[in-house]
């Protein structure tokens, strides 16, 4: 403006321009002179850092932030983005903030509070001073009182649409005084901690960020690496998995590959298979682009107990451990272990995918192993874990396979520890839930644990037989056999070879199965172990039957049966009689087949073992079906089905349903046949049995009628 203003008789023309702030023109001033700035005259801070050039995914999280932070409220809207190191928390916060700057014309404030950085965490007073200066407040550091600075910031923000991004926050205390008091402002917080008190006090949105999916990870690789990804999609997917889906790791990898343009992705994936090499590739001298440095910043803030527990993850086998198993490895009670694990979960160094079960990704596991190498931690952790699993498995096996000969030796392992399953169903459930970890124990290559290995393999065999976990059975016994050879224990070797031969027969590697049974028999005979020798003979007879050498099979089985009957071994006798029944049936000796099956069923009923009853009744039903005795065949098969359901054997349920379908077809009951066959098909498919094709073909034929 340029109005003429008379001053002492002189006209003075003042030229003012918008944006000059507060201007006062006075003559003589008596007393104090106070000037208050209008709100509109303050600077408008625009402090957001540049976003990530290759930001990928997070569509659902962006929508949640929109819905929560852009809604009208009388209170400030707050969102806490939490997650593990390198998962992309800051990238998401900044990317979202850039999208919505138009909704916050009063400005955007940004502060890295260094909660997990190489430097000490920023003090709230320091951050308050920086924000006040951004709004034009001179010398805010002169206000010694933190509450005074916080109150002044709230006053400045009142009624203005301002976005605050508080990045890399260590604790709620770090940001409590930074939060505005009015509903026109919004706050985005990022932290490796969940900051639960902030969420509760301010009704904050909690966005817990997970790793990128394989698809989104491949998309990020494609944006950073380029055409190489399209040419090798499977290798790219492997790399995403090896990087744990962490955007930081994938970004570092992009820099790594940029300087090696001739490197094929499949070669890179092979290079990353080595966990130590993986951390080297994904780290650099620049801490901003180093996975190892990012993980260290999370680890260094841990107290001694949680730090030791985290390092333990680098030594223990298995991807998923329950609190009881981890407590055993720690040498602590379950309450202490659970509290420690939950603290690691809160720091996003460990995840809890299922209640009471804990895991960590291979990258973190490799880093934990590195740290473990640097510390003189308790060396007994792995042995205690083996003791826990072997003792629990022994108790579970006694419930799943009662009257089975036991080999676990308290001189080799502490069998007083571990869990106590309540009943057979609880034992099967425990075996099922712990199967992956039980098998992972056999990755441990420590001669001091060889006795544990072969005894655990033997103990697990009962469940493997019931559940038809043939791959697990084969792997554990391959490892167990090597352990027995290192021990030089002939008896352990013979027992293990016998069980290994059984699974080799089940997977149709019959010549190898026969070799194992012959070797086991020779070892048992040298030891003078008649029972072991008879077990080998009976198992060899089963292999000969599969090779359709039925006469030879019956000779071996009859010899084994004579010993079992003489020593009163009813369960072994029943198992052998079932096998003899099948051989007699194959030779057309149906009377002998039914007789052997009936004797086997009688022994099983006396023993009251559901699995034995189901198998014997199935054998009897099949023998009667061959003899066209369909009525009594169905009785036996329904008995088999009942006991197969009780013991949870999918394979025996499938056999019973398949035979019931055949019996129904033979008697012209098409509806019952179709129902039984469909059930049999579902069961066989569950255990990936080749019989599924046979059942499917019969059903297809019925559909054409």
Image: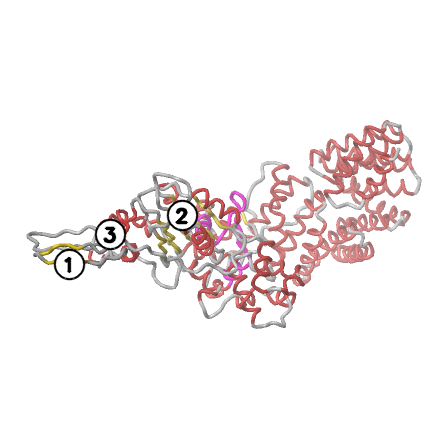
Q: Nearer the viewer, mark 2 or mark 1?
A: 1
Say whether disc 1 or disc 3 marks the residue closer to the N-terminus: 1
Give the labeled residue for mark 2: 103
Residue found at the very far right of the displayed protein: 588
Q: SS class of the residue under badge 3?
A: helix
Queried whether the magenta region covers residue 691, the answer comes back as: no
Mark 2 crowd level (few <14, some 14–19, many ≥20, 10 Å Cα): some
Q: Are circles 2 and 1 on residues that touch, CB within 8 Å?
A: no
Q: Left or right of 520: which side holds 318?
A: left
- Place residue 376 in its image quadrant: bottom left
Which one is nearer the viewer's eye here, 9 or 660? 9
Mark 3 crowd level (few <14, some 14–19, many ≥20, 10 Å Cα): many
Picture disc at residue 12? 1
| Residue 681, horizontal then vertical, whole percent | 78, 39
Q: Nearer the viewer, mark 3 or mark 2?
A: 2
Q: Left or right of 363: which side holds 347?
A: left
Queried whether the magenta region covers residue 350, the answer comes back as: yes
Residue positioned 42% across, 44% down in the render: 70
Which one is nearer the viewer's eye here, 178 or 163? 163
Using the numbered discs, state the Cα–Cα distance from disc 1 to disc 3 in whole angstroms: 41 Å
Please report the bounds of the magenta region as a residue range: 340-369
Task: Indicate the quadrant containing the N terminus: top left, top right, bottom left or bottom right.
Answer: bottom left
Q: SS class of the residue under badge 1?
A: strand
- In this view, 580 is above or below 286: above
Picture disc at residue 149? 3
Mark 1 crowd level (few <14, some 14–19, many ≥20, 10 Å Cα): few
Using the numbered discs, state the Cα–Cα distance from disc 2 to disc 1 in whole angstroms: 43 Å
Which one is nearer the viewer's eye here, 501 or 34? 34
Say whether disc 2 or disc 1 marks the residue closer to the N-terminus: 1
- In this view, 260 is above or below 247: below
């Amino acid at each position: 403006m340029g109005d003429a203003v008379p001053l002492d008789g002189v006209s003075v023309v003042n030229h003012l321009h918008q944006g000059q702030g507060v201007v006062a023109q006075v003559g003589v001033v008596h007393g104090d002179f106070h000037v208050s700035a209008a709100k509109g005259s303050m600077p408008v801070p625009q402090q957001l850092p540049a976003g990530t050039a290759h930001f990928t995914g997070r569509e659902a999280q962006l929508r949640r932030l929109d819905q929560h932070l852009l809604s009208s409220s009388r209170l400030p809207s707050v969102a806490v983005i939490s997650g593990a190191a390198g998962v992309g928390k800051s990238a998401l916060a900044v990317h979202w903030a850039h999208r919505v700057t138009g909704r916050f014309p009063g400005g955007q404030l940004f502060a890295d509070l260094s909660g997990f950085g190489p430097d000490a965490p920023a003090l709230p007073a320091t951050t308050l001073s920086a924000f006040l200066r951004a709004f034009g407040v001179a010398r805010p550091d002169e206000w010694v009182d933190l509450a005074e600075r916080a109150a002044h910031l709230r006053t400045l923000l009142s009624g203005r649409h301002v976005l605050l991004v508080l990045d890399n926050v260590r604790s709620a205390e770090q940001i409590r005084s930074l939060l505005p008091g009015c509903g026109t402002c919004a706050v985005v917080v990022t932290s490796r901690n969940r900051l639960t008190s902030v969420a509760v006090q301010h009704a904050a949105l909690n966005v817990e960020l997970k790793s990128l999916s394989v698809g989104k990870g491949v998309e990020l690789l494609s944006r950073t690496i380029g055409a190489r990804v399209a040419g090798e999609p499977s290798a790219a997917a492997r790399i995403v998995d090896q990087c744990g889906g962490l955007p930081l790791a994938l970004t570092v990898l992009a820099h790594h590959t940029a300087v090696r343009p001739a490197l094929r992705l499949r070669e890179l994936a092979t290079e990353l298979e080595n966990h130590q090499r993986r951390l080297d590739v994904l780290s650099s001298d620049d801490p901003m682009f180093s996975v190892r440095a990012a993980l260290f910043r999370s680890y260094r803030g841990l107290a001694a107990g949680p730090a030791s527990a985290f390092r333990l993850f680098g030594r223990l086998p298995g991807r998923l451990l329950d609190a009881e198993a981890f407590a055993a490895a720690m040498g602590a009670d379950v309450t202490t272990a659970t509290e420690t694990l939950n603290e690691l979960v809160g720091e996003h160094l460990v995840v809890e995918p299922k209640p009471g079960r804990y895991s960590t990704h291979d990258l973190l596991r490799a880093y934990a192993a590195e740290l473990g190498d640097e510390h003189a931690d308790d060396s007994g952790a792995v042995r205690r874990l083996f003791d826990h699993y072997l003792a629990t498995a022994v108790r579970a096996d006694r419930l799943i396979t009662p009257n089975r000969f036991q080999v676990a030796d308290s001189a080799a392992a502490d069998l007083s520890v571990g869990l106590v399953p309540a009943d057979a169903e609880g034992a099967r459930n425990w075996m099922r839930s712990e199967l992956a970890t039980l098998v992972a124990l056999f990755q441990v290559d420590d001669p001091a644990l060889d006795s544990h290995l072969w005894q655990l393999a033997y103990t697990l065999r009962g469940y493997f037989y019931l559940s038809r976990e043939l791959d697990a059975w084969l792997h554990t016994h391959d490892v167990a056999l090597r352990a027995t050879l290192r021990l030089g224990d002939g008896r352990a070797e013979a027992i293990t070879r016998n069980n290994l031969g059984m699974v080799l027969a089940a997977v149709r590697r019959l010549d190898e199965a026969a070799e194992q049974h012959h070797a086991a028999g020779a070892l048992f005979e040298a030891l003078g172990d008649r029972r072991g020798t008879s077990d080998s003979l009976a198992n060899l007879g089963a292999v000969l039957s599969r090779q359709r050498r039925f006469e030879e099979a019956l000779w071996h089985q009859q010899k084994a049966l004579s010993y079992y009957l003489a020593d009163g071994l009813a369960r072994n006798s029943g198992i052998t009689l079932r096998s003899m029944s099948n051989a007699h049936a194959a030779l057309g000796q149906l009377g002998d087949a039914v007789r052997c099956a009936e004797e086997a069923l009688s022994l099983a009923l006396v023993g009251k073992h559901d699995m034995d009853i189901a198998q014997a009744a199935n054998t009897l039903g099949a023998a009667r079906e061959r003899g066209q005795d369909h009525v009594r065949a169905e009785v036996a098969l329904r008995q088999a089905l009942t006991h197969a359901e009780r013991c949870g054997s999918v394979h025996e349920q499938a056999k019973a349903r398949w035979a019931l379908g055949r019996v129904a077809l033979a008697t012209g009951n098409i509806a019952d046949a179709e129902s039984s066959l469909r059930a049999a098909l579902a069961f066989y498919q569950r255990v990936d049995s080749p019989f599924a094709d046979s059942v499917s073909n019969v059903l297809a034929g019925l559909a054409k009628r």
